[in-house]
Image: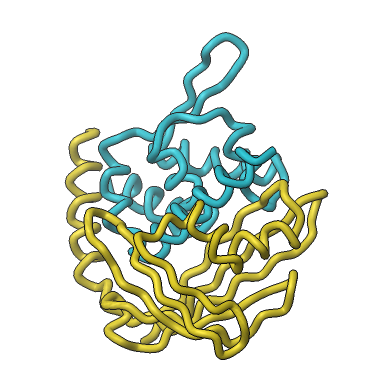
Chain colours: A cyan, B yellow
Amino acid sequence: MAAALDQAFAALSDPTRRAIVNRLARGPARVTDVADRFPISLNAVSKHLKVLERAGLLRRRRSGREHHLELRAAPLRAVALWASRYERFWNEKLDALDAFLEEEN
Amino acid sequence: MPKTVTATRQLKANPERVFRAWTDPAEVKRWFKPHRLIMDAKVDGLWHSEVEWEGKRWPHYGRFTRLERPRLFEQTWMSEATHGLETVVRVEFEARGGGTEVRLTHSGLPDDAAEDHRKGWEDILSSIDDLR
């Protein structure tokens, strides 16, 4: 129990991982969709995903060849409250900017 | 203790395009989606916006302090959430991988999140319990 908590909080101590969680809070996504959004390598994203997975915060679902990532709802509902208000605000706005610029292409 | 919040994104558009999306009011309206926006994007130019977020309208206002096209801009940022304190939002754009790395830093935020944090701890404790 205590170990599970330590892992969850350690996993959420990183801003990129919190941003990934913010993204997945809006629905499941493919690994590549998540990786595209962050200025780090696919390899680095994979490492972050593994940390979140080990902490029980997300799971992978295979559909055909693709892996979909989704949050495990129970522990993650808390994250929205836990993360700072402005961090959530800015992550949502950056997602909106990303979607706006993508639409244009 | 004032707090700093950071967020980064990798975008496909170039820095010039992304800079414009942030500093041209017609563009800002399209993605930031404020109810109201007044923006004079020049150093010492003022801005006001009303943003709906989590079911509430938040008026914000401030002043541009730096505009260095297309590398960065910086503005002061005040709202009910900052308790009238002049916080600072800096957004930097760096060409990277054929697109742009956006780095946003919001500093000087009042550390009034203690209550939110306490609530968050309680909730995460009980939800982790639910999984057992």
As drawn, the residue found furthest toward the right would be B98
As drawn, is B124 to the left or to the right of A103?
left
Observer-nearest of A38 and B38: B38
Tell me the residue at 48%/84% (across/down): B46
- Quadrant for residue B20, please give it: bottom right
Seen in the picture, residue A103 relative to A65 is either above or below; the reply is below
| Residue A41 in picture, x, y percent from top left | 72, 45
Q: Residue furthest top?
A: A64
Q: Nearer the viewer, residue A40 or B23?
A: B23
Q: Residue at x 52, y 54 (%)?
A: A94
Residue A76 quadrant = top left
Residue sitting nearer the eye, B95 or B16: B16
A77 on left or right of B10: left
Q: Position of residue B31 (x, y in %)?
A: 50, 52
Q: Nearer the viewer, residue A21 or A49?
A: A21
Q: Quadrant of the N terminus of chain A?
A: top left
Locate residue A64, reporting x and y percent.
Answer: 57, 9
Left or right, residue B25 beside residue A18: right
Count of numbered circles on the image: 0
Q: Residue at x 81, y 50 (%)?
A: B97
Question: What x and y, as percent, mark residue B36?
Answer: 37, 65
Q: Dividing the image into 4 quarters, which one contains the C terminus of chain A?
A: top right
Q: Residue at x 42, y 42 (%)?
A: A55
